Each structure stands twice: as structure tokens, then as C-alpha cells.
Image (cartoon, rainbow, N blue to C red):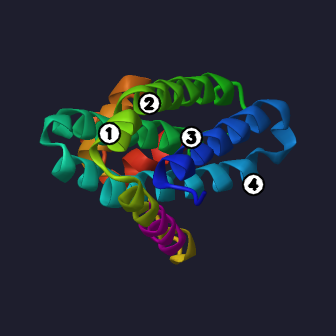
Amino acid sequence: MPLNVIDLITADHRDVEAIFDKLYKQPENRPALLAELAAKFTAHARAEESEVYSELAKAAPSERREVHHGTEEHHEAEEKLLELLDTDPTGPAFEPILKDLVKAVTHHVEEEESEILPALAKALPAKRLAELAHAFSAAKAALLNAPPRPVTRTKRELLEQAKAKGIDGYSAMTKGELAAALKH
């Protein structure tokens, strides 16, 4: 029986969980693991939103709220991932931020696997789920093969992060100064 999109999504979830485990157990390999996590998580989230969530919202309009919630959880996890990428992997702040990211992603995965994916299975025929597997995989591949783009945050996002971290004088800083202050 060919794989369907639900199989691919759940396999990605297990892959990210394995990377999280390695981040705890292999501190010397954190730079490479973080790069892998960032690439895979972002490609998965974008492909899921464009190919799967949009299809579910069309097939089952009653699921639009869950689709929106899933997208918001992706964005929240990406913010935590950005914070982790900006943190020294050998420093004391790394593991608490990693723990927050793991908690956010675990919560999202649990909700997705108990609510969104069952709704998708119910709303779409097996043939369409198999077709979505190809579309999801192709979208992920395109994102993974694209040249890396620098991650950019708005000044507002940087201001909020600086405030949360208690950086003195953050409100008068330029965007570049905020980014530099947050990095240190």
C-alpha cells in the first residue's frame, strides 16, 4: 500500500523528535543538529501549510479554526527555534530554550495527530491522500533545495524579545542594534 500524506507527516514528527533527543545527548554535535532541525522543521511546516492545511480547509470548512491554530503553532515554534539558533549551544541558556521548543512542538504534534490528521483522513479519500503525499514531498524538497535565506525578524519582534530578555535601552535601539544585543 503506498504511503499517504498522513504517513509522511507522522514520519517527519518522529524525525524531529529524534533530532531533539540528539540535541540533548550529543552536545558536541549541536551546531549541525540545529541546522538540520531548522531546515527540516521549516520545510515541513511550510509544505504542510501550503499543501495539506489548505486542502483540509477546503474539504472540511468546519476545520478552518484547527488549521489556523496549527499554523499559529508552527509560527510560535519557529520563533522559539530562532531564539535557540541565536543561543550559544554550549552556554547555560541553551537547554532551557531547547526545552521550551520541545514542549511547544510536542504540544503541536499531539494536537495535530489527534485532531487535524484524523479530520484529514475523514475528509479526503485515500486516492487524494496519496496525491497529497506527492505534493507535500515535492514542496518540502523544493524548500530544502532552495538557497538558504537569512531569517529576518521585524523590528517589533526584536523589540518584544529585547523587552522579554530585559535588555536596557532597547526601545531606543535600531533594528541592527536590537539584533546585535539579542545575539549577545
Contact, CB < 8 Å: mark 2 with mark 3?
A: no
What SS does tag 2 mark? helix
What SS does tag 3 mark? loop
> Is the stretch drawn in magenta largely helix, strand or loop?
helix
Mark 2 or 3, which is nearer the eye?
A: 2
* Residue at 38% over, 42% down: 121
Give the residue type that dot 2 points to: His
Farthest left residue?
61
Mark 4 or 1, which is nearer the eye?
A: 1
- The residues bearing labels 2 and 3 have C-alpha atoms spaced at a distance of 30 Å
Contact, CB < 8 Å: mark 2 with mark 1?
A: no
Q: Which residues are magenta?
A: 133-142
Residue 150 sits above or below residue 129 on the image: below
Mark 3 or 1, which is nearer the eye?
A: 1
The quarter holding residue 60 reads top left
What SS does tag 4 mark? helix
Name the foreground residue: 33 vs 174: 33
Name the foreground residue: 30 vs 171: 30
- The residues bearing labels 2 and 1 have C-alpha atoms spaced at a distance of 20 Å
Q: Residues within 10 Å of mark 3 (few under 14, many from 20)?
A: few
Which residue, given by chain and number where applicable, does mark 2 sit on? 108
| Quadrant in which the C terminus is drawn | top right
- The residues bearing labels 2 and 4 have C-alpha atoms spaced at a distance of 24 Å
Q: Residues within 10 Å of mark 2 (few under 14, many from 20)?
A: many
Which residue, given by chain and number where applicable, does mark 1 sit on? 122
Name the foreground residue: 110 vs 86: 110
- The residues bearing labels 3 and 1 have C-alpha atoms spaced at a distance of 48 Å
Which residue, given by chain and number where applicable, does mark 3 sit on? 184
Total marks placed: 4
Name the foreground residue: 151 vs 1: 1
Q: Residues within 10 Å of mark 4 (few under 14, many from 20)?
A: few
